[in-house]
Amino acid sequence: MSEAQGNILDNEELINTLQQSKVESNEIEEKLKLQEVNREQFKTLQNFYKDCAKRSANLYFAVADLAMIEPVYQFSLDFYINIFERAVERAPFGGKNERVKNINATFTQQLFQNIIRSLLEKDKLTFSLLLCTRILQEERKVVLQNEVRFAMVGGTWMDSQSCTPKQHLDWLSNKQWAQLQEL
């Protein structure tokens, strides 16, 4: 054994440092394994609540669409988030598969109750239609957004290319005829 090798083996500080770094390396390795387990659990939980996220985002846009009817119908995101948080707290737990359904049902009900209070009587049914169509769009993909927009605000054509067939439809204005054609 050479003198340099003997000095390295006799150096207690170096040996202690190497032992300490091995212990720290093992601790870091354990923490990384735990972090990977936590990441997988988080992904599972995230996927589990994905339907809640879709429903709440979808209904947010239904509430935002109210501004097309009346400009005063504008609700803050904080107001919306508070409704969602209260719904999560109040939703019954039930089984694992029932939790998402319960949150969605509670949130939809609470959202409806909170928004409907601030609407004019003439717009309450329209809001109900908006919620219903948004849910149908999300769950069954049966309602198109342009159809909903047309039902809410009417057509965008002001005048039809062809005039109203006056011989049979005297009661129909050109604007109404243009909206029928657009529909």
Image: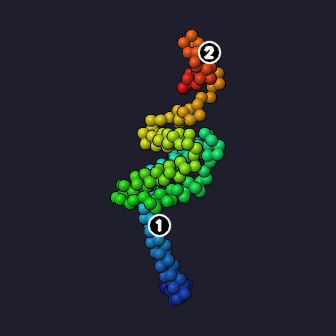
Indicate the position of residue 22 as horizontal and vertical percent values.
48, 78
Q: Is residue 42 above or below residue 172?
A: below
- On the picture, is 141 further left or further right than 13? left
Frontmost residue, 183 versus 141: 183
Q: CA distance from mark 1 to mark 2?
A: 70 Å
The chosen color scheme is rainbow
Q: Is residue 76 above or below residue 171?
A: below
- On the picture, is 25 further left or further right than 177? left
Q: Is residue 134 above or below residue 47?
A: above
Q: Quadrant of residue 93?
A: bottom left
Q: Residue at x 62, y 48 (%)?
A: 74
Q: Given this view, does label 1 or label 2 mark the residue nearer the observer?
A: 2
SS at mark 2 in the image: loop
Indicate the position of residue 55 as horizontal and vertical percent values.
48, 48
Q: Which mark is residue 163?
A: 2
Q: Quadrant of residue 40?
A: bottom left
Q: Quadrant of residue 13?
A: bottom right
Indicate the position of residue 135 as horizontal and vertical percent values.
46, 43
**What is the tally of numbered marks visible in this picture?**
2
Q: Give the amino acid type for the residue marked by disc 2 in the picture.
A: Cys
Q: Which mark is residue 35?
A: 1
Q: Residues within 10 Å of mark 1 (few under 14, many from 20)?
A: few
- On the picture, is 136 further left or further right than 182? left
- Can residue 6 be seen from the camera position used here? no
